[in-house]
Amino acid sequence: MHPEGSPISQRIREIPPSGIRRFFDLLASMEGVISLGVGEPDFVTPWRIREAGIYSLEKGYTSYTSNYGLLELREELAAYLAGRYGISYNPHRELLITVGVSEGVDLALRAIIDPQDEVIVHDPSYVSYMPCTVLAGGVFVPVPTNMENDFWVSARDIERRITPRTKAIILGYPNNPTGAVMEREELVKIAEVARRHNLIVLSDEIYERLVYGVEHTCFASLPGMRERTILLGGFSKAYAMTGWRIGYAVAREEIIEAMARIHQYTMLCAPRIAQMAALEALRAGDDEVEEMVAEYDQRRRIMVKGLNDIGLACFEPKGAFYTFPSVKGTELSSEEFAERLLIEEKVAVIPGSTFGQCGEGHVRCCYATSLAEIEEALERMGRFVRRLRRHRTK
Amino acid sequence: MKEILRILERDARKTPQKIATMTGKPLSRVKEAIKKAEEERIIVKYKTVINWDKLEEEKVQALVEVKVVPQRDVGFDAIAERIYRFPEARSVYLVSGTYDLAVLVVGSTMQEVAGFVSQKLAPLESVQGTVTHFLLKRYKEDGEILGVEEQPKREPLMP
């Protein structure tokens, strides 16, 4: 037994428990809650993809696959990346099918991080980057971003934090929680920094397909970045396949081989049914994805306008399915705001502080929910904010 | 225009104001586009999908296959017109295959529908024969699933 009596490792004790845990308990005891706190599409997986999963079960495709994943799927993915972004990867050695991007983040960091290596990440950012860095023995170095700069991380701010121990940069754009999409120009500057300091860039592009009126730039497609980038992608968001747990990692052979070694001993392979369904998703064409994107776009506009009308300043997100309005005017912390909004008006949102210090003063509202629900939620939020304002002026 | 139409096709009650926000287009342009679509009969009508089965007064529907002899100069159009003018004929289509016109007939009882087919449709001069299929259950109509489908629950909070 550990001298302090706890069986839990020091490393895990360093990771704080999720801040939204208590909201779960609150929510479980309430009825009639509209949740803008979800992190997944409200569409179900398109029928032809689900049907492919059913068919694979009927045919008895229930065995393991190669550690790297079905070759057919890797080939189809390589063709997809080549067609969409003009980057070519060898499906045999430079592509790994993972159990979602979540596993990909973990594998990538464990594959490249030595104890005390530093990883530079924009703040706010997706919740798993910090814990996975710590689990890999690394040091998490946040770079502030803010609404005034559309939550873009600047190459200059990154460069200022580089030390001899810096190993990698993580980029998560289109961004969860802010909805920010970084444009090519600024990404090129970050690429130059990565080259100058010999860094690896872990680019989480799970929301690549969900952009509105702008183009997504695949980081690996920038000059010289193919060899430096670990590109993580998946099927969850574009094809509404979150529960299937299926994603992929592409990088140069040396890195993928290292990631595959961890994957082989910890996961063995991604579920075969999910792989077969993902194959169908790639072959099914883009019609249903485009339909979903068009609908998110409409809801996005309603929500951004609605939040701004209420007085919760909201920059226009160009990707993913989140808005990240400021609640600073209410003089409540983001956690207080979220908690009181839930209790008083039964609308669930996620406090921005969940995603890093720079998320403080904001809440994340997801618009992957029906228009009717979005409108009702906006009404309730408006009531809540007006009430706060009245109390303050008294 | 198409985006506006798609929104209205799904929900005819969406106001021009809302559509303007949803599409990011100025209100005046949206109103103009809708007006133009109405004038050109691109928007034919605004109607409501009703599940009559839920009410006591059930309606009886039948899909009637009609085989006809086309007429010189007017082809199938003249006979189609004679048929679609009856209010009982809810939808009329010219189709390829073993018969020519597909007619959706609505009535309040089976007798009424059968009466319409035997008294009005079948005796028409150029009608060679009819086959009547009564609808037993409506699952999906005009893209809308009529039964209540249970929505799978999502995790309400997920960072």
Image (cartoon, coloured by chain):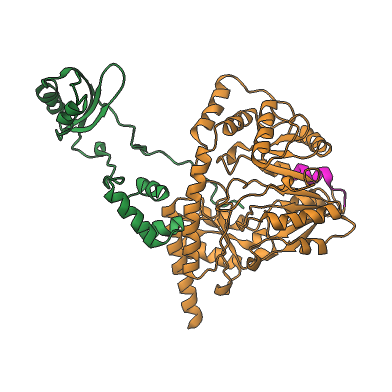
Chain colours: A orange, B green
Specify whether A166 is left or right of A281: right
Q: Residue furthest right?
A: A164
- The answer to whether residue A42 shows anywhere in this view is no
Specify whether A42 is left or right of A229: left
What is the tally of numbered marks visible in this picture?
0
- Which residue is painted at 9% across and 23% down in the image? B119
Specify whether A133 is left or right of B143: right
Percent coordinates x, y for residue A383 in the rendering: 44, 68
Main secondary structure type of the part rendered in magenta? helix
Q: Residue furthest front?
A: B73
Percent coordinates x, y for residue A6 in the rendering: 79, 51
The residue nearer to you, when weighing A157 against B1, is B1
Q: Quadrant of residue B66?
A: top left
The residue nearer to you, when weighing A249 against A115, is A249
Percent coordinates x, y for residue A310 in the rendering: 47, 69
Q: Which residues are magenta?
A: A105-115
Q: Is residue A101 shown in magenta?
A: no
The residue nearer to you, when weighing A249 against A246, is A249
- Which residue is painted at 80% across and 55% down in the image? A192
Q: Is residue A106 shown in magenta?
A: yes
Specify whether A279 is left or right of B151: right
- Which residue is painted at 50% across and 56% down in the image? A300
Percent coordinates x, y for residue B48 in the rendering: 28, 45
- The answer to whether residue A380 shows anywhere in this view is yes
